[in-house]
Amino acid sequence: MNINKIAKKIFLSVLPIATLSSCDTDIENIIVQHPIEKDATYYENLRAYKKSDHQLAFGWFGGWTASGNSPVKYLRYLPDSMDIVSIWSSPYNLTPEQIEDLRYVQEVNGTRVTFTIFSHNMANFPGNFENIAENIPAAAKAVADTILKYGYDGIDFDHECSYGDLLYNKSNMTTLLREMRKNLGPDKLILVDGNVGYITEEGWEYANYAVSQAYATGSPSRLQSRYNSVKNYIGPERFIVTENFESYWQDGGVNYNDPELGTIPSLLGMAHWQPSEVTEPGQHKGGCGTYHMEYEYYHSDDEYKYIRQAIQIMNPAGK
């Protein structure tokens, strides 16, 4: 499937604008997407694009309520081209409004929605399990049951564990991932973020993507070093890099030194970056994204402008 042809159908026009770096000396032309009228054909093309081989737009989304007048509380007002959104906080006990909002982005936009839980021990899991290795299969089933109950598209394990945590033990974490895949089947997503280098080779047989918290990364070499921690187990197409927009949303990240473009916002640097292992046409990294992507709604000139620019860089609509 030709991604560029699909993308052309999704977007009516692209306009170059000048984006200044923090030192106001380097200028990069960025393509901003302006959507066509959102009729049935638009959404059909959008869903086809989501199923095509392309670099993914990912984001952790906080404050989701699907209630009130503020669009920042809804999934449906995120950029249409978001591929995977992971709910950050309160993924359980969904209201009818949240269920309707979730189904809208899944069925109309083709967006996949997961939720995030910390995976250092089972205190963060649904259910009330004693934190011992023998309970990992039951805890995994409880997580899977929650995914299936609400119709999520999978799970994101935030693997920021420390020595002594139950799931710091690589064998225990591998058991968790194995049990999750057994309960979810082949079609649901399993993401691991945080300490992705702690996952075993077998563990990566069950997880789909490594999501690197590459926060405040200022150079391609630092991104490459992050991929190096998992490259023996997964290909570049399963590696997603992210920036912290809880801290850096206003500027699109920190200053990033691109070898060709000079100083640009780090999220855009991540969008341009490819691992050195990408050597053939059609190869690419998994994608890029942001932590607390909802902060970007508050740009006065264009809500979610940096993730929109990153999507366009990764998957140009104008070619």
Image (tube, rainbow, N blue to C red):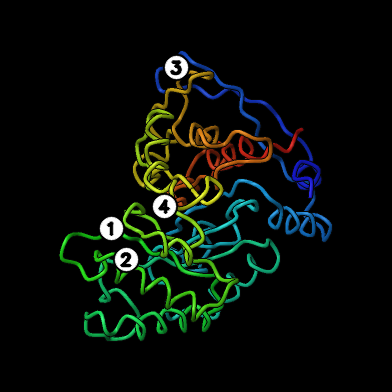
Q: Which residue is mark 3?
A: 24
User: Percent x, y for residue 89?
Assistant: 38, 66
Q: Give the residue furthest to the left.
A: 164
Of the image marks 2 and 3, the number of the one nearer the N terminus: 3
- Pair 3/1: label in front: 1
User: Percent x, y for residue 124?
Assistant: 29, 73
User: Percent x, y for residue 262?
Assistant: 48, 18
Amino acid type, residue under disc 3 in the picture: Asp
Q: Which residue is mark 2?
A: 118
Q: Which residue is mark 1?
A: 160
Q: Give the residue furthest to the right.
A: 41
Q: Residue 292, which numbered label?
A: 4
Say above or below: 53 vs 18. below
Secondary structure beneath disc 4?
loop
Name the quadrant containing residue 29.
top right
Amino acid type, residue under disc 2 in the picture: Phe
